[in-house]
Amino acid sequence: MERDELRRRLEFYRDLGLTTLYRKQKPVAVLEEAAAPAPIVLPAIEPEGDTLIQIREDIGDCKRCRLHEGRHKIVFGSGNEHAKLVFVGEGPGADEDEQGLPFVGRAGQLLTQMIEGTAKKEGIPLLRPDVYICNVVKCRPPENRTPLPDEMEICGQFLYRQLQGIKPKAICALGSTAAKALLSTKDGVTKLRGRWHRWRDIPLMVTYHPSYLLRPYNQNAKREAWEDLKTVLHFVYD
Ligand code: URA
């Protein structure tokens, strides 16, 4: 294949949201050495000087995955473009889908209370609009189901651009979907929470998703989530 055509084809796959392609192995007889399929890692898709406005424009009226079929509004994210702290949730629910804003339903109200209440108690002058809040997928999954791996991969490119563009001092992943998307791990929140990880070079804390904390029998998790948040706020704002 000509180089130009190969480049065009790779760009096409990249636009589809695929970041790694695997070459078919040649028949064993013609392999010089039996090697695993060579991954072709596509070039970084976070342009220099990327801005949230540009990223939103690139998402456009997105139809890259099946989630567009049932959505009313794309929920891009909200808050301070220069935030030192970014919260990443899973995906919009019904209220968010209707308003086009992240975390505005019951879980969102709890998240706001957690951020502002903990900050106040710890003597940190911080309100929700000072941070940035977004999700792994920007369209509501039907019946609020967990986003599927291909949906996460396709939409993940925009999440990565948001994080790379904002360059916060820390990221807080809310729940296991956000943790999976940012840490490529299969471990659950209970195992990951309460200590620092990294997304690229940025310190990342995993904690429970506010929807989980709304369930009445999760009082212990609630206490732990408050501890996690306290750690994050002091790290970022002290
Ligand atoms: N749950 C999420 O993960 N994100 C939202 O925006 C709302 C609820």
Image (cartoon, rainbow, N blue to C red):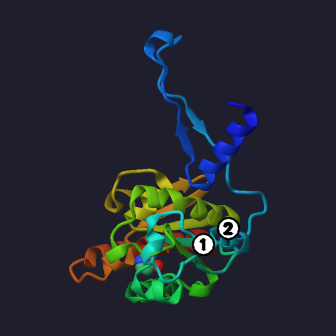
Residue at (67% x, 67% y) in the render:
58
Say what amino acid the circle numbered 2 marks.
Asp
Q: Residues within 10 Å of mark 2 (few under 14, many from 20)?
A: few
Front-lying residue, 147 or 111: 147
- Which quadrant is home to the C terminus? bottom right
N-term mark: 2 or 1: 2
- Which quadrant is home to the N terminus? top right
Q: Quadrant of ligand 1?
A: bottom left
Q: Residues within 10 Å of mark 1 (few under 14, many from 20)?
A: many
Q: Looking at the image, do the residues carrying marks 2 and 1 touch, with CB atoms under 8 Å apart?
A: no
Residue at (44% x, 73% y) in the render:
69
Secondary element at tag 2: helix
Secondary element at tag 1: strand
- Residue marked by disc 1: 85
- For ligand 1, tell me if the residue under mark 1 lies within 8 Å: no
- Residue marked by disc 2: 58
